[in-house]
């Protein structure tokens, strides 16, 4: 059973959840805080910390003027997690992000990415971290 805000779908057990949720603090197409939630399966044989380092390397290679501003391990909803803070340059200008990767069961990961155009203020960073800290993982439904 796949559960989402608007309902459920009865899918075969072999299907993987690769949904992307995007939540914005502003109206459509206006600049502001955007939070995206994505899911991924760790490659075969790769540990969680290796996966996080691999993801950092991939975004470092893919994004213009990427700057890693900080990284730290964390625990969210009793799960291992890793937070990175970074900035990079998009076509429309600089982007500031706090990216939190959470280790899920079954060799999966969830990534919560908070993004703002320009730079986050210290108050915005505090609020992003507060929001992410409220994560409450639910047992996976079969």
Image: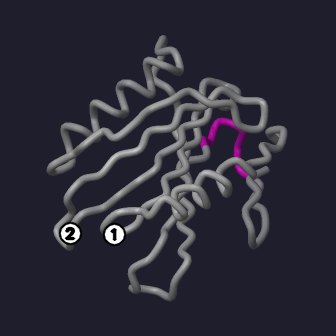
Placement of 103 over or under 62, stated as above or below: above
Q: Could you say which quadrant of the image residue 127 lies in?
A: bottom right
Which residue sits at x=28%, y=35%? Answer: 58
Which residue sits at x=34%, y=63%? Answer: 119
Residue 79 pos. (x, y %):
71, 29
Q: Could you say which quadrant of the image residue 31 lies in?
A: bottom left
Q: How is the image coloured?
A: one colour
Q: Could you say which quadrant of the image residue 115 lies in?
A: bottom left
Looking at the image, which residue sits at the far front?
Answer: 122
Residue 138 pos. (x, y %):
82, 44
User: What secondary structure is marked by label 2?
Assistant: strand
Decide: marks 1, 2 in contact (CB < 8 A)? yes
Quadrant where the C terminus is found in the figure: top right
Is residue 136 rendered magenta in the image? no
Give the spatial CA distance, label 1 vs label 2: 7 Å
Image mark for residue 93 = 2
Placement of 124 over or under 72, stated as above or below: below
């Amino acid at each position: 059973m796949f559960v989402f805000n608007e309902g459920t779908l009865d899918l075969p057990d072999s299907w993987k959840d690769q949904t992307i949720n995007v939540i914005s603090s502003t109206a459509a197409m206006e600049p502001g805080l955007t939070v995206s939630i994505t899911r991924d399966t760790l490659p075969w044989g790769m540990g969680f910390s290796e996966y996080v380092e691999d993801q950092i390397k991939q975004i470092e290679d893919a994004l213009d003027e990427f700057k890693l501003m900080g990284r730290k391990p964390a625990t969210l909803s009793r799960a291992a997690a890793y937070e990175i803070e970074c900035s990079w340059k998009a076509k429309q200008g600089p982007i500031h992000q706090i990216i939190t990767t959470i280790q899920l069961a079954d060799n999966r990961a969830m990534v919560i990415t908070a993004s703002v155009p320009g730079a986050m203020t210290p108050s915005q960073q505090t609020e992003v971290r507060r929001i992410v800290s409220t994560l409450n993982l639910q047992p996976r439904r079969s």
